[in-house]
Structure formats: C-alpha cells, structure tokens
Image (spheres, rainbow, N blue to C red):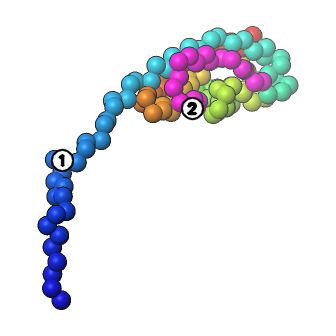
C-alpha cells in the first residue's frame, strides 16, 4: 500500500502551542486566635464539658479543619481532650481536674481554593479549671 503523507497539514511544534496560564496562588490569609475559657471543676467531675468558640478564625480561604497538637499541650490533659475536626469545639472528658490552667494546642488548617494555597496556624487555647 502506498504511504500517504499529508503535506498540507499544519505542523505544530511545542513552541507554537499555547502555554497554559499559570497564576501564582496567593498565601492563605488565615488568621486564628485562641481564648482562655473557664471550666468549673465540679461540673467537669460530673459530665463531659464542651467548650465552644474557643478559637476565632478569620479570612480563611477554603474548608477549615482543626486538630489537637501534642507539642505544647499540657500532657495531663492531652488524652482527656478531643477537638472537633469541623467546628473546633473542645470537649473535656468527665473526670477530676486540678484547679489550674491547662493548655491545648490546636492546629487550624484552611484547605485553600483556586486562588489561595492551603495554610495553617497553630493556636493555644487555655482552659482554666476553677
């Protein structure tokens, strides 16, 4: 069979191909601040205590998630605390707590979006048991 080479077909070399427009994603303008929250020891002894609004997040681009961080947290309280991944609410397990201030370090992460990179901030929530 004769080999047919189309001569009128345009030859596209990589240099002629349109370059994809790459826009540099901006850093996530995530800001997170933590508050000191007070818990009554006698209440914590009877039932689990949920601390809401301990962390304020502003300017986050993309979905926000929360996670407790062992480094910097008071070791005695670390295992007795859970941090809600979606809301950031901190729950203290029912139990006996010494009347003092505990620290819970929380990493706040914003996923980013088409214009912003993912970003995270680490904050320390102080839980005052009295």
- Magenta span contains residue 37: no
Q: Residues within 10 Å of mark 2 (few under 14, many from 20)?
A: few
Element at label 2: loop
Residue 68 in the figure: left or right of residue 12: right
Element at label 1: loop
Q: Which residue is denoted by mark 1 in the rendering?
A: 16
Which residue in the rendered view is the most extreme toward the bottom? 1
Q: Residue at x 48, y 32 (%)?
A: 113
Which comes before the other along the chain, label 1 or label 2?
A: 1
Residue 121 in the figure: left or right of residue 1: right
Q: Which residue is denoted by mark 2 in the rendering?
A: 63
Q: Residues within 10 Å of mark 1 (few under 14, many from 20)?
A: few
Q: Is residue 13 above or below residue 40?
A: below
Pick the front one: 65 or 14: 14
Label 1 and label 2: CA atoms lie apart by 39 Å
Image position, residue 87 (x, y; %): 67, 28
On the rendered image, what quadrant is the C terminus found in? top right
- Which region of the structure is painted magenta? 49-73
Q: Residue at x 43, y 29 (%)?
A: 115
Q: Residue at x 79, y 14 (%)?
A: 40
């Amino acid at each position: 069979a004769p080999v047919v080479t189309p001569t009128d077909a345009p030859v596209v070399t990589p240099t002629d191909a349109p370059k994809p427009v790459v826009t540099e994603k901006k850093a996530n303008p995530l800001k997170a601040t933590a508050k000191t929250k007070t818990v009554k020891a006698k209440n914590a002894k009877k039932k689990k205590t949920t601390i809401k609004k301990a962390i304020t997040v502003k300017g986050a681009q993309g979905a926000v998630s929360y996670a407790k961080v062992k480094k910097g947290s008071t070791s005695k309280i670390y295992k007795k605390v859970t941090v809600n991944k979606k809301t950031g609410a901190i729950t203290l397990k029912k139990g006996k707590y010494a009347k003092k201030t505990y620290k819970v370090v929380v990493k706040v992460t914003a996923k980013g979006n088409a214009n912003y990179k993912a970003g995270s901030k680490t904050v320390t929530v102080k839980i005052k048991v009295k």
